[in-house]
Amino acid sequence: MSESNGATATAVPVTSRKDWSSDQEVRWCPGCGDYSILAAVQMLMPELGVRRENTVFLSGIGCAARFPYYMNTYGMHSIHGRAPAIATGLATTRPDLDVWVISGDGDALSIGGNHLIHALRRNVRLNILMFNNQIYGLTKGQYSPTSEVAKVTKSTPFGSVDTPFNPVSLALGAEATFVARTHDMDRAHMQETFRRAHQHDGAAFVEVLQNCNVFNDGAFEKITSRDARASMLIPLEHGQPIVFGAEGSERGVIQRADGSLEIVSVADVGLDALLVHDEKRDDPGLAFALSRLARGPYEPTPIGVFRAVERPEYGTQMSEQITEAQAKRGLGDVAALLRSGSSWTVD
Amino acid sequence: MASGTQHVTEQLDQVIVRFAGDSGDGMQLTGDRFTTSSALLGNDMSTFPDFPAEIRAPAGTLNGVSAFQVHISDHDILTPGDSPNVLVAMNPAALKANIDLMAKGTILLVNSDAFDERNLAKAGYETNPLTDGSLSPYSVYEVPMTSITQEVCKEAGVKPRDAERSKNFFALGLVSWLYTRPIEPTINWITERFAAKPQVVEANTRAFRAGYDFGETAELFESNYEIRPATFEKGEYVQVTGNQALAWGLITASRLAGLPIFLGSYPITPASDILHELSRRKEFGIRTFQAEDEIAGIGAALGASFGGAIGVTTTSGPGLDLKSEAIGLAINLELPLVIVDVQRGGPSTGLPTKTEQADLLHAMYGRHGEAPLPILAPMTPSDCFAAAIEATRLAVKYRTPVILLSDGYLANGAEPWRLPDLDALEPIDPGFASEPNHVDDDGNPAFWPYVRDPETLARPWAPPGLPGLEHRIGGLEKADGSGNVSYEGVNHERMVHLRRDKIAGIAADTPLVEVNDETGDAQLLLVSWGSTYAAVAAGVKRVRARGMKAAHVHLRHLNPLPANLGEVLDSYAQVLVPEINLGQLSRILRAEYLVDAQTMSKMQGAPFRVGEIEAAITALLGGKS
């Protein structure tokens, strides 16, 4: 570990996408949304000013979880749902590392739901990218915790009766300090969102809407297709009024007297009446209300950074307690430790 | 009360005292203090805290009885003793729950104030045992502990209700007098421990002194007793519990390896004290993580190991169930990881505060697929120190998860421990990978994470941070050498064999067993493992004193088994394996060596009594002596 600290003293080498791509053949289905996410990440990494040897991609199980094999960094493909827990141990003991967690909707919200919410509330320095395709892909097409009600799948031939999670709402409710949403059809938006997540000192949660062209094709088509985007995606920009839609038919978000949000025509209310997005707002209430604007990917859906607030990072605080203890008590002395109770001598 | 009675002080070679009361009566504290003052006097001692899972079951009921047994002696002892010489019973329930342990003629010290109608009814007594003659086989001393305590505390302005809580110190004072323990260490301890509450210091001190003086002045006891110091090897000693020694062993291992410890753990009885102890010791660079669940505890520990720390997780049976998945991953990743299972009664929630050894087969086989790992078990509370170091050494050297099987009896039991020579402990070499170990098809240096050390079969440990050593590992089967994902059948079989051979090879790196066979011609061999060591060793000693011949071998390493064990087992006509389970080790011995290892089973939430081992040996040897 000391070697790595020594290495960071020199300038970060200039790299390209090729340097960040491993020699392993990518084995996702042709046409899968994961390809564009992988490309976005591989092309972004050279811009982040980080070293490959200090970067770790960690995943659980599922299609998304194969991601680490394709990155020429350190990596671990672990077990279903547990990546946030494993990453917590790594990130807290190795604050010098840049740790990315790659997950899917089943991995993060079903079997791993517990680990996700606790990593978020602890604010561990992790970049968590959750690819949401609203289906189980690797097990060949069962409904997921984000699938819409009445979803007909192999395991729900009569339609699912489960109410889905809204991942952004869930993360906000779990005390996350950074919550964002992007989608696999817009590389620039993905890269900007991932860059912001990487800059955040703490747990960053990004929901990436991702198309599974085999088991749930077109799940997000109504909002992410090239034609739909302008009128169906609501870009959130800090300090800017929340407005979307083609020129001439712009719509925006206002806050009603009772605190709830409503989408209205800008022509009707005027630009000044619109809600100005504040991602740094301490109270997550408005961010939560924004996350509830769309009931599903068929209504205008906010994308971008919902919340980005500062709160002490978990591993940093853990390290500080050690530093403080050592400053106060000196470096631990094993011989003294063994005598910390009463001792007696036999001559 | 008459005063000035001259007591005779008699010599005893040993005594077993059992303190019993309500869970809220402070019996564990009382027993612990008595133990410490005895240890400081130089006695050998062994303790057995025996308490319910409920924090405070309804007062006065049998369910709420908490007991602490301590055995002190002037010679080397191994166990907390079979049958107490003295029972301190703070109420009728405590008497009722423990009376069956008492032999005729032993001493009962009862708090007579608590034997009112209400408490008698709660304990299920139809008549008062103090007056109905049922206790006539015993020497019963009725002492109004509550009222005397209240009386002496009144003078210090302590309300009777608060004073009542100090009655355990009265009992401690009385027993301290009875066994001539010095009073200063306990008074100093009270002063220090309750420093924040001067009134509590006052009440406890007064109660303690009153108990001591009561023994001295009341014409109740004809004599008191002295137990001379035991002969110990020269050295510095401390009193230590298993959990404490285990935590200290982990800290020491961390120093020996020059690597930080990361403990990922979820609170669980009886393992939590290891988490508590390690979380206090941040000056050693230890990170303790109280995880959201057992799975996250081991997951985070494994993540820390990937990063080059010593990942540790501590748990008990129910937690080991949940950790199986991550242990399998650790076996596949071939990363160091120390898993401490402080066994308790099962299945399911079972007996949370009571000891058992029934997780051995779980540790051996409780994972899907062929998933071997090293297993070892400490034999005494203080041995938890060395066992934790050994577990860490094997984990680091062989890049493998290791299960350390402690148990509730070792975890909470205390004994004197001669401090080891720290300088004599062998360093643990992490042996991190430092450079590429392969040349790719284009002639460029590359790093293959599954190239093995020819001697240990261990793979390189390459924590992130070094350029050129970037690699990906995971739970999918890997190609031998390169570590790339491989579903190829022949490769899978080779990897299964390699993982097996790596663990089996550890037998060459661990000590051979030594048989304790005094005359060399015993026909019966007793095999102990873990905490059964004490009762078996003591039982063998006893039958030898009666002229019988029995040999004893103790297993510290349960997987792989010691290289010479088969030969040892073959050289005895009979093999007996006493275990606090239904015969898990004997099943393994039968499977491994085709020997007729007989099971001696006990599953009562308590260790074997020496008398039980003695009786079993006697029965097996029949007339042969």
Image: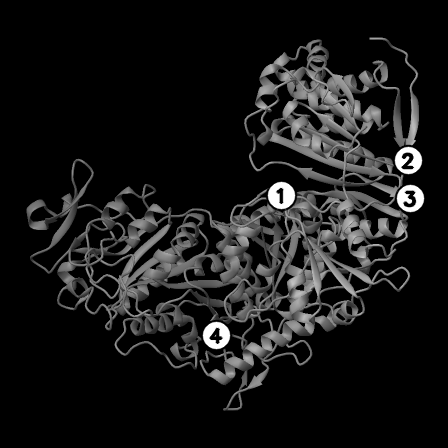
Residues at discs 4 and 3 in contact (Cβ within 8 Å):
no
- Would residue B465 be visible to someone looking at this image? no
Q: Position of residue B98 (x, y in %)?
A: 69, 31
| Amino acid marked by disc 1 | Lys
Pointer 2 chain: B
Q: Please name the residue shown 19% across and 68% down the image.
A: A218
| Amino acid marked by disc 2 | Arg
**Which numbered disc flags the more N-terminal residue, 3 or 1?**
3
| Amino acid marked by disc 4 | Pro
The numbered mark at residue A13 is 4
10 Å crowding of disc 4: few (<14), some (14-19), many (20+): few
Image quadrant occupied by the C terminus of chain B = bottom right
The residue nearer to you, when weighing A12 against B86, is B86
Callout 3 secondary element = loop
- Would residue A55 be visible to someone looking at this image? yes
Measure the alpha-carbon separation of dots 4 and 3.
68 Å
The residue carrying mark 1 is B354
Residues at marks 3 and 1 on the same chain: yes
The residue carrying mark 3 is B231
Question: Image quadrant of residue B168?
Answer: top right
Q: Please name the residue shown 39% across and 51% down the image.
A: A117
Q: Position of residue A47 (x, y in %)?
A: 39, 69
The residue nearer to you, when weighing B444 against B608, is B608
Residues at discs 3 and 1 in contact (Cβ within 8 Å):
no
Is B74 above or below relative to B535? above
